[in-house]
Every structure is written in structure tokens, then in C-alpha cells.
């Protein structure tokens, strides 16, 4: 199952709720303001860093670039994908849940 | 693969419409079929042809219309959500006694059943919103 | 349409602050006509949608809370409420509207629609679905 999160963890509990319900083996894609959850060195980093052992976490590259965030600012292990990668993730998983 | 997309926010205020558009362009490029794009909540505001953004910005409404024309996309605006927010096609204008309509080319107004049908028919449903 | 899919409508927002809960309910009611395998889940602030005693007279908004009581008539009989979300918000099941449905296979016995489930149970339920909507 692919989960998408589009809210900053500094503003919303969406990422936390998603992590609370996502099963091991799930994919999580951070999009729009959700990409702030991928940042290393923040008060929310530990929450996602812990999850990356059981869950594959991705961040949408165009949204990182738009917000001036290079890949080296991300939590190690988070993979950056484009919209083509988003499509591939949506098709590779049996369903998509958007944590709006 | 057959994909359906739901767009729940209007243009410009929220990125949802941009993300949905970019996703669909990428999906079409990868050879997937877009079964339907369903606009709900403030997403119905993507379907007004009266939108006039500044020239140096993207024209979100026209972009949908053009994509629809190029790929024969089914762009459906929810009638109940549209009535609340003043998105009107010629039939709706007549039925509700309005002096004009504003639906953009490529969009059509229909019921929520179209969304449920998309959920049933498509292999994946993707929701973009706030 | 012969194919039956499992639909889950997830409600995560409180009522009245935004239109999402009301318009979400409209999707559920229309969707009921399609005879799919439907359930609803109330998590996070969504649990506030089911709070008893909603009174919108002074705020001037439309009180749509009676619609939840009609869900049983639309054969929406499985309404999951996440226990942790209730507890985090200082609520118990007694704070929620009693929602029921009539079981035609059991002499139209009135049965509760609301099931309080743990986060783990909800996670399992989510995984079973074919289509998930969020309101």
C-alpha cells in the first residue's frame, strides 16, 4: 500500500497518523508540504527515521526543489523520485491512501 | 493500468491541482489510461473558464482543458459541489434560472455516482486535496 | 456492474470548521446505491463528527449530524471509531451518537453500527480495502 502525506509535520499530525497505521512493507511518499517531514535534524526527524527500517520512504523531488531543499538535507535512506516515480509507486502498490 | 484521480482543492490556493496535473501528465507519458478526473469540494473551481491569472503564471484551468483535448480526458465536476460554489454549465444555468454559465471547455458537470464508478472501474484511485 | 470492491471512507476532520465532513457524507450516501462493500472509519479529529448534542442554531450553520443516524437505512452498517483517537481527546463511547441499523436477516433487529477498534485493528482493516477515500 502506498501512503501519501502532503502536510508539514510542524503543522499537522498527518505524518504521525500515517506512521501509526502504515504496515511494515508499506511505501510512504511525501509530497507538497509533506516533504518537510523528510528533513534531517528537526524535532520530527526521529519519528520518520525510526520508521525507515520497516517502511520505504520517498520524497517528491520537484517539491523539494521548489522549496529550496537539496537531497543532502534529507534523512538518510529516503529516496527522491519524480512524478514518473510517483506513478510507478502508485501502480506497484495495490492501493493508494492519501493522508489529506 | 487504468487510473482515476480525484481533485479536492481549487486552483492557486492549494498545490493539489498542480500535483494532480503533473501526476496525470506523467501517467499518460508512461502509457497508462486515465479513466476519469473527478473534481470535488473546492476542486470544482478548476472548471471555471472565467479564471484570469497573471500572464507570468501558469493557467491552471486552460491547462486542464488543453490536456483534456489532447488526451480525451473525462473531466467531471460534481454537480452538488458545483452548485454550492457557482460553477454552472448551460443546462444547469437554465434549470436554476441563472443569467450565465462558466464551465470551461473539456469539463462536464455530473453526479457523485461518477466518482464511485471511477473507484469501481479504475485499478487505482488517487486523491489530491488539502 | 457486477464487481464488488471494498470501500472505506476515512473521516479525520472535525465538523463545521470545514465542509469536508458534510460533503464526505454526501459521497457515502450516493455510494450506497452502488452496492459495494462499504465501511466508514473515524479517526483523529474525525471522532468529533459523532459527538452527541450538536446544536448549530446560534452559529447559523446547517446541522448535518442527523444524517449519521440515517446511515443504517443506507446499509452503511460498519462504522469504526479508533479507540486511541477517542482517548486522546478525552472522549468515551458514551459521548457519541448511538448509530444503529436493522438486520433484515435477524427479524429486523436493531444493532449498533459503531465499533470501537484499536489502532492496530484499524491498520488491518485499512489494508483489506480496495478503495480508500479521505474526508
Image (cartoon, rainbow, N blue to C red):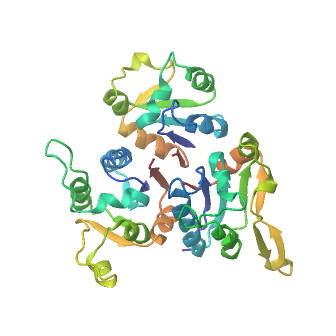
Say how many tags the image has: 0
Q: Nearer the viewer, residue B66 or B1?
A: B66
Locate residue A56, reporting x and y percent. Answer: 55, 30
Left or right of B18 in this view: A51: right
- A25 up-or-down from C121: above or below: above
- Return the residue found at the far front: C58
Image-quadrant location for residue A61: top left
Q: Residue at x 69, y 58 (%)?
A: C50
Left or right of A32 in this view: C42: right
Image-quadrant location for residue A73: top left
Left or right of B106 in this view: B111: right
Residue C128 visible at all: no
Locate residue A45, reporting x and y percent. Answer: 55, 21
Residue C37 visible at all: yes
- C120 up-or-down from B79: above or below: above
Q: Nearer the viewer, residue A6 or B51?
A: B51
Q: Residue at x 36, y 33 (%)?
A: A63
Q: Residue at x 75, y 43 (%)?
A: C90
Locate residue B84, reporting x and y percent. Answer: 40, 68
Q: Nearer the viewer, residue C31 or C124?
A: C31
Q: Residue at x 51, y 62 (%)?
A: B119
- B13 up-or-down from B84: above or below: above
- A75 up-or-down from C6: above or below: above
- Return the residue found at the far left: B55
Locate residue A57, reporting x and y percent. Answer: 52, 30
Amino acid at each position: 500500500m502506498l501512503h501519501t502525506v502532503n502536510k508539514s509535520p510542524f503543522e499537522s499530525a498527518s505524518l504521525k497518523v500515517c506512521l501509526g497505521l502504515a504496515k511494515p512493507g508499506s511505501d510512504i511518499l511525501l509530497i507538497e508540504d509533506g516533504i518537510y517531514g523528510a528533513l534531517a535534524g528537526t524535532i520530527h526527524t526521529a519519528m520518520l527515521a525510526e520508521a525507515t527500517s520497516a517502511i520505504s520512504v520517498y520524497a517528491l523531488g520537484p517539491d523539494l526543489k521548489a522549496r529550496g531543499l537539496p537531497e543532502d538535507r534529507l534523512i538518510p535512506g529516503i529516496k527522491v523520485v519524480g512524478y514518473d516515480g510517483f506513478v510507478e509507486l502508485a501502480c506497484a502498490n495495490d492501493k493508494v491512501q492519501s493522508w489529506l | 493500468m487504468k487510473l482515476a484521480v480525484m481533485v479536492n482543492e481549487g486552483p492557486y490556493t492549494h498545490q493539489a491541482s498542480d500535483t494532480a496535473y503533473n501526476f496525470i501528465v506523467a501517467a499518460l507519458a508512461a502509457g497508462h489510461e486515465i479513466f476519469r478526473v473527478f473534481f470535488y469540494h473546492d476542486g470544482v473551481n478548476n472548471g471555471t473558464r472565467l479564471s484570469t491569472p497573471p500572464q507570468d503564471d501558469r493557467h491552471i484551468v486552460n491547462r486542464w482543458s488543453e490536456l483534456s483535448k489532447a488526451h480525451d480526458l473525462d473531466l467531471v465536476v460534481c454537480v452538488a459541489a458545483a452548485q454550492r460554489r457557482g460553477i454552472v454549465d448551460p443546462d444547469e444555468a437554465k434549470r436554476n434560472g441563472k443569467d450565465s454559465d462558466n464551465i470551461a471547455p473539456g469539463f462536464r458537470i455530473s453526479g457523485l455516482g461518477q466518482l464511485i464508478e471511477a473507484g469501481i472501474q479504475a485499478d487505482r484511485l488517487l486523491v489530491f486535496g488539502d | 456492474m457486477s464487481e464488488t470492491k471494498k470501500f472505506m471512507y476515512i473521516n479525520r476532520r472535525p465538523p463545521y470548521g470545514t465542509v469536508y465532513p458534510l460533503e464526505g457524507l454526501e459521497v457515502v450516501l450516493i455510494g450506497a446505491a452502488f452496492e459495494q462493500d462499504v465501511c466508514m472509519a473515524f479517526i483523529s479529529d474525525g471522532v468529533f463528527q459523532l459527538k452527541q448534542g450538536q446544536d448549530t442554531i446560534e452559529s447559523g450553520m446547517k446541522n448535518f449530524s442527523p444524517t449519521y443516524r440515517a446511515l443504517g437505512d443506507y446499509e452503511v452498517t460498519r462504522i469504526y471509531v479508533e479507540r486511541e483517537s477517542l482517548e486522546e481527546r478525552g472522549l468515551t463511547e458514551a459521548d457519541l451518537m448511538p448509530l444503529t441499523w436493522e438486520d433484515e436477516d435477524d427479524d429486523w433487529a436493531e444493532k449498533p453500527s459503531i465499533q470501537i477498534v484499536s489502532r492496530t485493528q484499524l491498520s488491518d482493516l485499512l489494508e483489506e480495502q480496495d478503495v480508500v477515500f479521505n474526508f
